[in-house]
Amino acid sequence: MLIPLDYYRILGLPIQATAEQLQQAHRDRTLQLPRREYSEVAIVARKQLLDEACAVLSDSEGRKAYDASFLAKTYDRESEAAQEAKHQRSKTSAGTATFLQDAGETAPAESKALEAAPDPHTPSIEIDDNQFVGALLILQELGEYELVQKLGRPYLNNGSIAIAEGRFGDPQLVRPDIVLTVSLACLELGREQWQQGQYENAARSLEAGQELLLRESLFASVRGEMQADIYKLRPYNILELLSLPEEKVAERRKGLQILREMLQERGGIDGSGDDRSGLGIEDFLRFVQQMRKHLTSSEQQALFEAEAGRPSAVATYLSVYTLLAQGFAARQPSMIRRAKLMLMQLGRRQDVHLEKAVCSLLLGQTEEASRALELSSEKEPLAFIREHSQDSPDLLPGLCLYAEHWLQEEVFPHFRDLANESVSLKDYFADPKVQAYLEALPQDAETANEWVVVQPRAGKLPGRLQPTAGRSPAAIPAQPPTAKQGASTVTLTPVPGDASTAASGAKSQATVAAPSAVAPVSIPIATVPHPAESTSKHRRRQHSGRSGASGKGLKGDLVDRARTKTAEITAQVKSMPPNRLALFLVAGVLSLLLLWLILSLLASAMQALSGPLQGEQALVRLEEPPLEIPALAAAPEPRAAGAVSGEITEESARDLVQGWLSAKAAALGPNHAVEELKQVLTEPALSRWQLMAEAQQRNNAHQRYVHKLEVNGVKTNPTNPDRAQVEAQVAEKAEVFDRSQLVSSRNENLRVRYDLIRQEGQWRIMDWQVIK
């Protein structure tokens, strides 16, 4: 039986190997036993081939004769006739192999088909039939996964009788060995394709191996390995399928179906269920963010609105993004209004006032937009808005410019069908459909229901902020705001006769009634918070400067009012006849109670003015870093540090991995030293981590790391001296900061296999894999 192997490959040696190297390689290969699932038949057949290779190459005369034949096959050029003959034989062999696989030919025919077309330039050896399983095993160990499947699968078809007749040995032992070798070839081929970015092909290879094992009802542990890899591969497979052209309807639909299965297993986007992908909640959110750019706005709407019903705060927020994008692009303000209503659900626990302001602006509700800005704690956007509203009595010019930039740079790029669309508020407001909808919008009722400050507990409480009359939709001109670069020239021109605009500067008054003889005292709701009102929100409002007065001025104003009212009450009491004295003594007591109420309100106001700016932090933010999936591939490639050269040792490997951990801490740290990654990493990992570090820098986020490293072993590639693997134990403590505020932390102890490559004499890390 002719097998495409040679004695040098069997021992894992180059043709220049010395006699000592031959003996050492034979000892090493003999000691490196295959997986425990193999039978004694396979192990013995493998050892026979190792012994035969060593015996031929150890004999000087035998080696000379073998080398002559080996070199002739390897380096001789074929004539044109030989090339044509080879081509015809390949076609015949391929057709015969396909027929065999489909129809299940007999063993002699199978053997002839496999032996019919040996490649003249591929060294091969003649083996006994009982060594076939050993040859398959060696080919699998050498990484010839496709060749193993080509040679082994025909014998596993239902119509094959070669194994049953005992051609290769005891059928009860040989068949499981061939099944195991072919399925392991599927497993390793899938991992290799995974590493190469061929995710759909990797999934098919893994599924093919799993189907074979299920059909044969063998090796449940190997089947479990494949299933684990399939689960971990799903995020990658989803990204590949969804990134296909929209014409690939079936493939993209399959990607969405796999995604829904993962979401169901997790219990939602922000759920804590186990989908066996290895992604935690934060990693899965990054994956979702990365995936979004491959989905259209309608696909995202269907996906996230369904997820929002779980309920899910993250899915609700993503639905808001989708409705805003679709509503603006399709000139459908009704979708923007739906987005605004969804924000009301999130507003009870998160600071989404900036998004509310944008929604209100696009709905022509400019008064509400201004009030939402006053409640927002987003410092950088507010600074931008104020900077571009310096020559305006309100913040609307800056808000218009910010909304345009935000939609263009932060919203549209996350939708496949909108990424290249331009954003223009002028065109939006000039659209007749938009104008008609805004004019018909029930402004007053919607305002009263939506913009009441939500209390943290149930029940109707006094002193909630009530909206002032908002501008009517007609106040948005047919020619909407425009902006000139470098100047704050954005303007909103009210329609003449808009009475609400003239009255917009007036403050709402809440009247506290005293007894009949005491004049009423009016307290401006806009400047004095009620004790039951949310302290954090009033702190933001007063910090934003709406009242226009310092704490000292406010205090003096209220004290003066109280003193004046007390003096008036005293004078009235002294001038009263005796028979009315008792009545006004009661009024005096009530006046003292009124004074106490004023001072209580004053104390709350001063506490709000002097206290630190606080408030709930948004669980989902306007800016999120690009989603990067951790490297989960089972057979990644290595990287090494720029300072490590020569032969890789445990000491140099430790320096290299430590260099990567230091570069990671520097690139993702507060100084964002992204350039340090180039000293340690190479592709494919370099681009991935550069993007991650740059995204964190753009979003003013960083991480702090503490690492402990222990290298467990180094293994060089016997066939490629420029490749190696390092296995290490890494303890990592990480703290994640958003705008200098700690938002999360984690502490992990991982076993990691790093894949290294030597480029221009320097070792670098290509990729790595977390080992369970």
Image (cartoon, grey):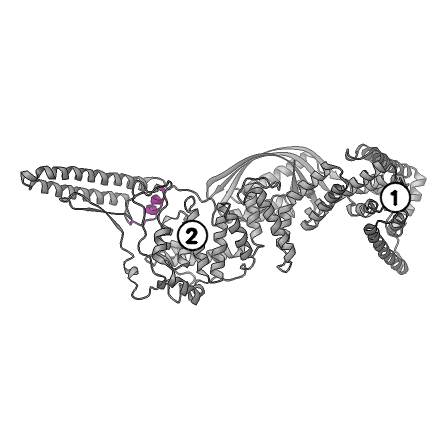
Q: Judging from the image, what secondary structure is the residue with disc 2 in?
A: helix
The boundaries of the magenta stretch are: 536-548
Judge whether 382 appears above or below 616 on screen: below
Which three-letter amino acid code belongs to the residue tagged 2?
Leu
Q: Is residue 67 left or right of residue 444?
A: right
- Of residue 511 and residue 657, the one placed in the foreground of this image is 511
Residue 559 picture quarter = top left
One can see residue 126 in this view = yes
Counting from the top left corner in percent of width and height, residue 107 is at: 88, 46
Which three-letter amino acid code belongs to the residue tagged 1?
Ala
Counting from the top left corner in percent of width and height, residue 693 is at: 55, 46
* Residue with the mark numbered 1: 162
Question: Label 2: few (<14), some or many (≥20) within 10 Å?
Answer: some
Question: Label 1: few (<14), some or many (≥20) within 10 Å?
Answer: many
Predominant SS of the magenta segment: helix
Judge whether 176 appears above or below 495 on screen: above
- Of residue 478 and residue 408, the one placed in the foreground of this image is 478
* Residue with the mark numbered 2: 341
Q: Is residue 62 left or right of residue 629?
A: right
| N-term mark: 2 or 1 | 1
